[in-house]
Image (spheres, rainbow, N blue to C red):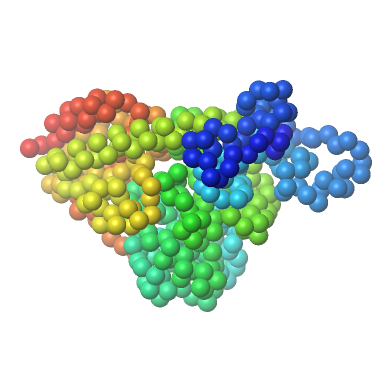
Amino acid sequence: MADDAPKPHRSHGFATRMSHAGRAGTHAHGFVNPAVHRGSTVLMPNAQARRDFAKDRFNRVMTYGTAGGPTQYALEDVICEIEGGSRCVLVGTGLAAVTVPLMAYLKAGDHCLMPDSVYGPARTIANGLLANYGIETTFYDPTIDGAGLAALMRPNTRVVYTESPGSHTFELQDIPALAAVAHARGAKVLMDNTWGIRNFMPFEKGVDVSIQALTKYVGGHSDVLLGSITTNTEEDYLLVRGAASQMGHFAAPDDCWLALRGARTMALRLKHQEQSGYAVARWFEQRPEVLRVLHPGLPSHPQHALFKRDFAGACSLFGVVFQPRYTEADIFRFIDGLELFGIGASWGGYESLALPTTGFITRTATSENLGGYAVRIHVGLEDVDDLIADLEHGLATLPR
Ligand SMILES: *Cc1c(COP(=O)(O)O)cnc(C)c1O
């Protein structure tokens, strides 16, 4: 099992920890990587073990496939290193990593606060299952300060959900200020930290539960769906783990193995994609067809000061808002004319993507009018000069 492998020290650099966390230990005959342990039944040494093991099933005592095994444990260790948390629960999709902690912390009669910029399916469960179970959600302007949040808190507000930046409109949130208010009123802070992976340290900023769609940069190759829920106290871990277990959530060992492989090179890919992303974003900013670029790392971003304060870097996902004179048909022609940018959901893979935003987002607390038609760009690992030439070619299809 992975647990006898020497663990890296938190004082080691990120690259060192990504190389040494989650290795196989001695149980794989010296092979560096843990094996893919597929399995349902786990045989026990004797009948008494059945009684003893059951008490400890969330503590890496292997009793049945759903409690995980060496492949999952290795990935859990790596995600804890990335996020700076103490324990991690793996689930089959990023969306399950959103829904499990919501179900864990909220019950009938409770109130939840969610940013208006939240990942769409999070809004759907808030207005769907959570509402059906008697949980009320208020959507708030993601850019509010601590006083703004305090005004929205109710005695029964149990969860302040956050996502910074929003993955379509890229508003940043003042997480430490919001967390201080939430904690003073006894609410938990949940954060979808997918955009900020490696660059935003959630637990240093007051987050209680950090959600990752590992599908994105950790997977990194557009071939796996997976989610993680990381916590930093044993109490939070047991609550989230218990909810995931009650609902039958599970992360398949083959998928965990792919994510483990992706994690080994994530920092390198992310760095390259960050730089290419900046190059493409700055290029867009110079173009007369473009009204504004929604990239938290650019000085033109309205909350750029928060980015500089809280983030060590950016990923390669951002938005481009076109001049209002362009119609949807114009923008669709631009997107369809691109050769190197695929049209598809998700991000964090090695391939570049362009996706229409306008008309595909819901806003109830703020305006969905960004000033013009918006497109979300994901920059992959291609040569950036080729990407810019392709975009230039695409822009040439727009009416003068
Ligand atoms: C993609 C995504 C998710 C969900 O991940 P899946 O693995 O596709 O279910 C959650 N949050 C954000 C911000 C995402 O971009």
Q: Is residue 10 visible?
A: yes
Check the picture and name the quadrant holding the C terminus: top left
Q: Nearer the viewer, residue 328 or 59?
A: 59
In this rendering, is residue 237 above or below 335? below
In this rendering, is residue 156 above or below 241? below
In this rendering, is residue 173 above or below 78? below
Q: Nearer the viewer, residue 343 or 64?
A: 64
Query: Residue 348: x, y in percent?
Result: 41, 36
Q: Is residue 333 visible?
A: no
Q: Nearer the viewer, residue 79 or 243?
A: 79
Lateral position of residue 396 relative to residue 53, left or right: left
Query: Residue 369: x, y in percent?
Result: 24, 56
Q: Residue at x 30, y 30 (%)?
A: 341
How many labels sit on residues?
0
Q: Residue furthest right?
A: 47
- In the picture, residue 158 is in which quadrant? bottom right
Lateral position of residue 373 relative to residue 110, left or right: left
Query: Residue 141: x, y in percent?
Result: 35, 64
Lateral position of residue 175 relative to residue 208, left or right: left
Query: Residue 221: x, y in percent?
Result: 45, 29
